[in-house]
Image (tube, helix red, strand yellow):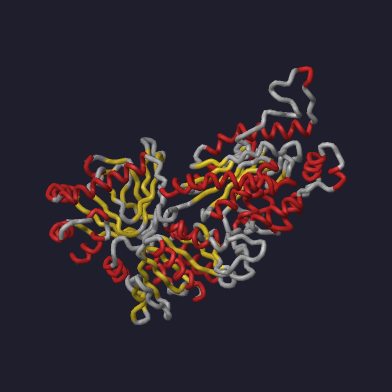
Amino acid sequence: MTDDKILLLEMHGCTAGLSAEILHEMAAITEVVRYEAGQYVHRANQPLASIYLMVQGRLKQTMVDTHGKVVLERLMTRGSQLGVLGAAQGEPIPVNVIALEPSTLLRLDYQSTLALTRKCDALRLNFLALISDDLRRVLTFDRHLPQPSRVLLLHESSASRLLTARLIARLLELGEHPCVLSDAPAWKPMEGVPSRPLKESERILSLDQIRRQIQQWPESSRVLVDADAALEPESAARLFEVCDQVFWCVSPDNWQSALARIQTLVARIPEWKDKIHIVWLLEGSQQVAPWAPELMEQVESDFKISFSDPRPGQSRALANGLERLVHELRGIRIGLALGGGAARGMAHLGVFKALEQHGICVDMIAGTSAGAMTGIVYASGMEVDYSIERFMHDLKPSWPFQMLPRGKQWYLLYKYRRGHFDPMLRRHLLDRQLEQLPIPSMAVAVDLVSGEMVVRDRGDAVHAIVESINVPGLSVPIYRNGKALVDGGLVNNIPANVLVERGCNFVIAVSVTAMMEHIFARNRPDTPTDEMRPASTLQTMLRSFLVQSKNMNSVGVQPADYVIEPDVTQFDLTDFDRTDELAAVGEQAAQQAVAEIKTRLADLDDRLFV
């Protein structure tokens, strides 16, 4: 039993650098305790007399005020501690701690542990480091996301085992030291990658066997557990307990079988939903994942990956899916916030192109108005040059409008009033849902019924765009599901804050309204009163929209880590037929920004962003 306690103690950071003698003394004052999902480790306003070290599972820690109102919540995972400060007070503390899933903790008597820290400087310093880390997370905005060190890959078919090999190769390139437990019959050891069969005598290893194996591998290793999804529920639950994150690999042909298995596991421990990510393996002509809302209700998120070469007119959005998965493992989530600005928003297309060229893979996109339109089209997997070509073709005024004074403005009004944007976009996006697109995307609109911002992150992709670009005055509100929806630029023109709220820890914002020319209807600041020219109603509406967008930029953009500001002041708001020129300006602005963006990204991960 002492050896088991020592094994568990060695899995926790507080024992780093301790001698065998001190470890044995710690084991003597340690009790192994297990909590099932929903059980309380500690209840608010009761004294805490022990120190708890987490070696497996997840806990939710909730601080309450004198009225029982929650004032702070945080997640505790493997390596966390509870009680080093609380037990020292010797008084009731206003903290609830509850197990979210089956969790294993080591309970140490506080007074005995205190005596041991007086004897061992290394142990005292380790505890101080844990306290310091806790305080940093509570008192500061910690930009680093969790990096799961034990990752479970479940495969609905042997075809997706290729993902494991590709993932290992990429981690090796980044200087990681992956180790593998695999039940694949054809698993072949890879040079420099320690591995062990996950099964012995046709049975999955026990929890103790897995722990002992992990302990034998270097502490800095990332352990990949590679298994067939058709496990017995008990075996699957065992692997869920030991792993930090689960990537469930499916294809359009077999996702229904995954749904049944996931439902069984989530019914057992509902909080396991937060650990599961679907990985869609798409091949050949498969450019979007199936629409599977019942599956997505059971999991945290999904990734779409293809190892096939992009087809003509398609970007590398699916080919970059593996890199997005690597971002997740390394605690990186890059968001791209795209502002509105009518035709000037076509500059966003050039920004996509420049970021792609420099290997900056975007994990999530949020856009307002033109930013929503270009962002969702890009997220759908359309190649940038092809998108430019289609926008120029689809938004070029027909010849009767070309003959009219201010024909582009009248043509834009005509497109809105006749409802042409929906069929125009649907020719390319079809009836795809946002959840199906290769890159997670959101569109910002405003509901005039509630007066609040609406963020669409699911549902019909075309609907999300036309709601977000629905400029008041040019068109009537879109009435849908109790909402009257108009252009999101009314309240949030550059939704960087939306991306931060969704977990992005590095946000690039693009503003096409940061710079505004000081001219309106040919009137300049120095134009004498008697020489000033009246503007048409349509000109006034478009100019008012631009002024409002410029002044709303600061609302959502504040959390952005870098703002790209293409100078598009030489373009009219209706110059959609100059999309190629606008994209070129956006590309140039982004090219000039890339070096600084990569430098700032390197602060988060200097291996991914050299």
Tell me if residue 369 comes above or below residue 255 in the rendering: above
* Residue at (49% x, 40% y) in the render: 559
Tell me if residue 283 comes above or below residue 46 in the rendering: below
x%, y% of residue 279?
Answer: 52, 64
Give whichever of 558, 260 is nearer the camera. Answer: 558
* Figure quadrant of the N terminus: bottom left
Where residue 472 sits, quadrant-wise, is top right
* Residue at (62% x, 34% y) in the render: 515
Give whichever of 605, 412 is nearer the camera. Answer: 605
x%, y% of residue 37?
Answer: 38, 58
Q: Is residue 277 left or right of residue 463?
A: left
Query: In the rendered picture of this protein, how many numbered marks are placed on residues?
Result: 0
Q: Is residue 237 left or right of residue 512?
A: left
Q: Is residue 22 visible?
A: yes
Give whichever of 57, 472 is nearer the camera. Answer: 472
x%, y% of residue 399?
Answer: 86, 47
x%, y% of residue 596?
Answer: 48, 44
Q: Is residue 98 visible?
A: no
Tell me if residue 272 comes above or below residue 601 in the rendering: below
* Residue at (71% x, 32% y) in the render: 543
Instruction: Looking at this view, name the residue that lies furthest to the bottom.
Output: 201
* Residue at (46% x, 47% y) in the render: 505
